[in-house]
Image (cartoon, rainbow, N blue to C red):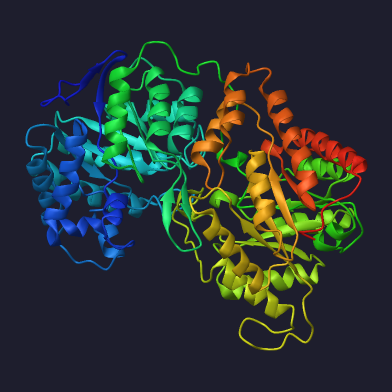
């Protein structure tokens, strides 16, 4: 039985039941309003209370029934980390006062607390002294929030069960009969960062004193939907879902945004609601419009499951990294550019595994090379997810006579590490590289990890060109030059296609030798890319990715940076029966191969979920088509 709450949360009644609707993001929305990224927004409670109140009010007007205080990182440890010496009690009490004023009795006010250490520890158990410190820190913040008159408390964005349990033990006695919501924020579907299955984690959190358990932030709506599908929604009390707007993406202009849109967010949240989750809202990247659209969707929902028959995968690992190329069985050390001059180059992406078992990866690489792939391309920890080093796997492929194409991101290494890494690739005889910005680390497996970004991919292109001249990043001679063949990424799925092409031209001028595009699902867009890049003077390889299910298609279309499906492709996947969907996805890819093989000097195939059998068949099909061509275009060679 749930305790009798002093002030029950407000809810709204829809066809599927009653819902509590949280507000959306505070921090990212303030950034949209002009607050610089990196600013500890909790300090604004003291310095810019009117701005905080304005954000709160917009969420109330959008239809939320629970307003969260601007106190997420208002604990002593987090504030000291930012070099702030503000009084914890004053900052948190002021946060409650601002939210209460904005709510105007139209919404409940819940205090919000985030993990004090969650982003800065990776798997190690807390020591006794750390537990004691955390208990005091959480109690201090909770006392301030409760004394200011909150209606409930939310502990959110905890990646580790262990720290969540420490926080619950510290705040539960302080709350009395106020409700406690605890939202975990895993980095992998179905399991906390410290390795506890979600169903078990939920049970332990409830036993510790939480009234509502749930998930928020990192996984986004698709990941949270899938997590609840795996863990189940028990009948023992309220569950919550408060995802990001989508997957965090960072452009080369250092702009930060999220994939997805309000319609897709609400559609996925409706699926979550149909599983029995009743406390719903938005986290990073969401805005008042997201909450308004979510509420409207819940009010219109019928009782029939939407897309309940769709059973296929939709994990972030399905995403090809920014762009790719592969390696294959041509002859040792030959560049992808040389290959493209002699025949249609086929590059296949095969992502390194997240574990130490590499047998299937090597098996897939050998099968692809045997089918006619020229290079195997490997991402560099795509989406900030930890994988086996692509340098190590590239070396193993070289030993097997398979030519690798290695991605190098700007995210993971400072300039010292970056030059050292490239020198290591050169020593190993790995020539083909793709230089990409890289997805931010914040929503990968180690959200406390720092995204370096000392330089942009265009800057790195210029610097690698200097390595090819025998000059290091610092200007010092290297005694001999490297022999890198430099690839660059092109995302055609943008609002301003012409501007994207102009930026691509600057990359080529900076030293790029070839171009790889994000997967393209529209033959007309392929033709537009071919025409726009015809005079670049370097080969362009268009990306093609076989789809595996309707859910996979929807995930790629709405959630993955740089990918958009054509309406026809999306509809065909949605209309396919689940058991037929992989064959339909492969048929769509074959049709795209037929177009691409005539327009471009080569293609880049992306292997979904390490299902290399699909890309083996597509590689063989592309080779059979090549044999039938009477002539080939030379515009991109």
In the depicted structure, whether residue 263 falls above or below residue 58:
above
Residue 102 appears in the picture as rendered: yes
Where residue 42 appears, as percent x and y from the top left, is 22, 55
Image coordinates of residue 25 in percent, x first then y, are 29, 44
Residue lying at 48% horizontally and 51% vertically, measured from the top left: 249
Which residue reaches farthest top? 303
> Vertical placement of 630 versus 238: above or below?
below
Identity of the residue drawn at 64% across and 38% down: 521
Question: Based on the displayed image, in which of its 4 quarters is residue 243 positioned?
Answer: top left
**Residue 355 can be seen in this image:** no
Q: Which residue corresponds to the image point at 7% horizontal and 43% vertical from the top-left? A: 101
Q: In which quarter of the image is the N terminus?
A: top left
Question: In the drawing, does residue 108 fall left or right of residue 260?
Answer: left
Q: In this view, does 270 lie above or below 567?
A: above
Residue 119, percent from left and from top: 41, 52
Quarter holding the C terminus is: bottom right
Q: Compare residues 431 and 522 and report the one nearer the observer.
A: 522
Give the image location of residue 559, x and y in percent.
49, 40
State the residue in front, 224 or 121: 224
Total marks placed: 0
- Please give left or right for residue 421 compared with residue 316 in the image: right
Horizontal side, residue 599 vs residue 17: left or right? right
Q: Which residue is drawn at 76% across and 54% down?
A: 393
């Amino acid at each position: 039985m749930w305790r009798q709450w002093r002030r029950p949360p407000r809810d709204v009644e829809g066809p599927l039941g009653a819902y509590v609707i949280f507000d959306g993001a505070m921090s990212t929305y303030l950034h949209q309003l002009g607050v610089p990224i990196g600013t500890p927004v909790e300090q604004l409670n003291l310095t810019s209370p009117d701005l905080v109140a304005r954000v709160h009010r917009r969420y109330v007007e959008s239809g939320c029934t629970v307003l969260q205080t601007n106190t997420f990182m208002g604990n002593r440890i987090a504030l000291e980390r930012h070099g702030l010496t503000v009084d914890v009690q004053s900052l948190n009490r002021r946060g409650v006062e601002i939210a209460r004023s904005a709510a105007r009795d139209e919404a409940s006010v819940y205090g919000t607390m985030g993990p004090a250490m969650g982003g800065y520890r990776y798997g190690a158990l807390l020591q006794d002294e750390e537990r004691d410190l955390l208990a005091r820190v959480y109690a201090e913040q909770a006392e301030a929030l409760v004394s200011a008159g909150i209606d409930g408390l939310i502990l959110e964005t905890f990646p580790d069960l262990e720290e969540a349990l420490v926080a619950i033990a510290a705040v539960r006695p302080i709350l009395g009969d106020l409700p406690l919501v605890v939202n975990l924020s895993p980095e992998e579907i179905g399991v906390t960062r410290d390795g506890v299955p979600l169903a078990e984690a939920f049970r332990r959190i409830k036993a510790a004193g939480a009234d509502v358990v749930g998930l928020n932030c990192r996984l986004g709506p698709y990941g949270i939907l899938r997590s609840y599908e795996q863990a189940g929604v028990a009948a023992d009390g309220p569950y919550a879902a408060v995802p990001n707007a989508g997957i965090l993406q960072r452009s080369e202009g250092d702009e930060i945004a999220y994939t997805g849109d309000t319609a897709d967010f609400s559609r996925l949240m409706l699926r979550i609601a149909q599983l029995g989750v009743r406390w719903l809202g938005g986290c990073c990247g969401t805005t008042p419009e997201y909450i308004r659209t979510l509420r409207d969707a819940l009010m219109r929902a019928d009782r029939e499951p939407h897309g309940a028959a769709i059973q296929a995968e939709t994990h972030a690992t399905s995403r090809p990294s920014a762009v790719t190329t592969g390696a294959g069985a041509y002859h040792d050390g030959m560049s992808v550019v040389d290959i493209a001059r002699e025949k249609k180059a086929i590059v296949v992406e095969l992502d390194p595994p997240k574990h130490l078992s590499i047998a299937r990866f090597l098996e897939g690489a050998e099968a692809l090379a045997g089918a006619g792939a020229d290079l195997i391309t490997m991402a560099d920890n795509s989406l900030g997810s930890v994988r086996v080093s692509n340098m190590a796997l590239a070396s193993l492929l070289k030993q097997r006579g398979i030519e690798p194409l290695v991605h190098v991101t700007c995210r993971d290494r400072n300039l010292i590490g970056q030059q050292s890494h490239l020198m290591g690739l050169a020593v190993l005889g790995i020539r083909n590289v793709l230089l990409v910005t890289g997805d931010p680390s914040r929503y990968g497996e180690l959200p406390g990890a720092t995204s370096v970004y000392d330089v942009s991919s265009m800057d790195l292109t210029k610097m690698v060109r200097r390595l090819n001249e025998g000059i290091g990043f610092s200007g010092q001679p290297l005694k001999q030059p490297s022999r890198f063949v430099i690839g660059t990424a092109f995302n055609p799925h943008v609002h301003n296609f012409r501007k994207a092409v102009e930026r691509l031209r600057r990359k080529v001028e900076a030293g790029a030798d070839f171009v790889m595009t994000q997967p393209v699902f529209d033959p007309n867009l392929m033709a537009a890319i071919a025409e726009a890049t015809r005079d670049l003077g370097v080969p362009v390889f268009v990306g093609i990715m076989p789809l595996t299910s309707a859910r996979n298609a929807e995930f790629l279309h709405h959630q993955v940076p740089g990918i958009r499906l054509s309406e026809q492709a999306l509809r065909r996947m949605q209309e396919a029966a689940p058991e037929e969907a992989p064959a339909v996805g492969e048929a769509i890819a074959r049709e795209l191969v037929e177009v691409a093989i005539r327009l471009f000097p080569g293609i880049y195939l992306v292997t979904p979920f390490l299902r290399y059998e699909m890309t083996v068949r597509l590689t063989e099909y592309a080779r059979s088509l090549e044999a039938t061509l009477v002539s080939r275009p030379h515009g991109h060679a």
